[in-house]
Image (tube, helix red, strand yellow):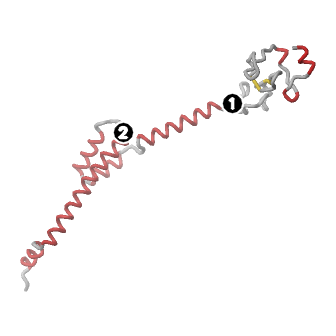
Amino acid sequence: MPDLSGLWTAFVNNPLIQLSVRLAGLYVLALYLAMVFWTVRDAQQRTENQILPYLAGLMVVLLNIFGLFLYLIVRPKETLGEAYERQLAEESLLAEAESRVVCPTCKERVQDDFILCPTCRTRLKRVCPNCGKLIRPEWNICPFCAKDFDERDWTVHAGGKASEAERVRS
């Protein structure tokens, strides 16, 4: 019968086997350190707290792979950058919703160049009797042609130009 302890000793003392065991140990150590490093870096990207990332790393150091699984369960679902982008998108949508033109009477959406609301017929804009451009009803002067006007100038003109009789009156 062969000597098993002698075979085992010869196998373990083989330089190739010793090198393989050391490389496997270094590989496991590198994975362990990478796991701790990844946990700390990921936690730093997901919280503004300065202490929590290091506590998460300590949990992984103490509990190893189980600590990593615990961290993955309790970590915030989005990074600070993702939260910031989401907030910007929400603010952009809100600003877009606020910039929509609505009728002051019926609150229906209207286009910016409408003169009347198609739903309730409220006057939204007026045509300048001098240049024919659309202006707000509360303005007393046209910002495009600098025409100063009074109430009798507020008529809707065909083609946006004042008729000859109305020009003579002015």
Residue 16: image x %, image y %? 16, 72
- Three-letter code for the amino acid on which mark 1 is drawn: Val
Instruction: Kindly report the distance in space between the C-alpha atoms of the residues bearing marks 2 and 1.
Output: 39 Å
Q: In the rendered structure, which disc, 2 or 1, sits on the residue that comes first in sequence?
A: 2
Residue 93 relative to residue 114: left or right: left
Q: Is residue 168 above or below residue 109?
A: above
Residue 3 relative to residue 157: left or right: left
* Residue at position x 10%, y 75% in the image: 8
Along the line of sight, which residue is nearer the eye, 113 or 102? Answer: 113
Q: Residues within 10 Å of mark 1 (few under 14, many from 20)?
A: some
Image quadrant containing the C terminus:
top right
Question: SS for tag 1?
Answer: loop
- Three-letter code for the amino acid on which mark 2 is drawn: Thr
Q: Quadrant of residue 168?
A: top right
Residue picked out by circle 2:
47
Q: Which mark is residue 101?
A: 1
Q: Is residue 163 above or below residue 10?
A: above
* Residue at position x 71%, y 33% in the image: 109
* Residue at position x 28%, y 53% in the image: 34
Q: Is residue 9 above or below residue 127?
A: below
Question: SS for tag 2?
Answer: loop
Q: Which mark is residue 1?
A: none
Along the line of sight, which residue is nearer the eye, 10 or 151? Answer: 151
Q: Is residue 55 above or below residue 146?
A: below
Image quadrant containing the N terminus:
bottom left
Residue 73 relative to residue 25: left or right: right
Residue 17 relative to residue 125: left or right: left
Residue 147: image x %, image y %? 78, 17
Residue 42: image x %, image y %? 34, 46
Furthest residue toward bottom: 1
Residue 26: image x %, image y %? 20, 60
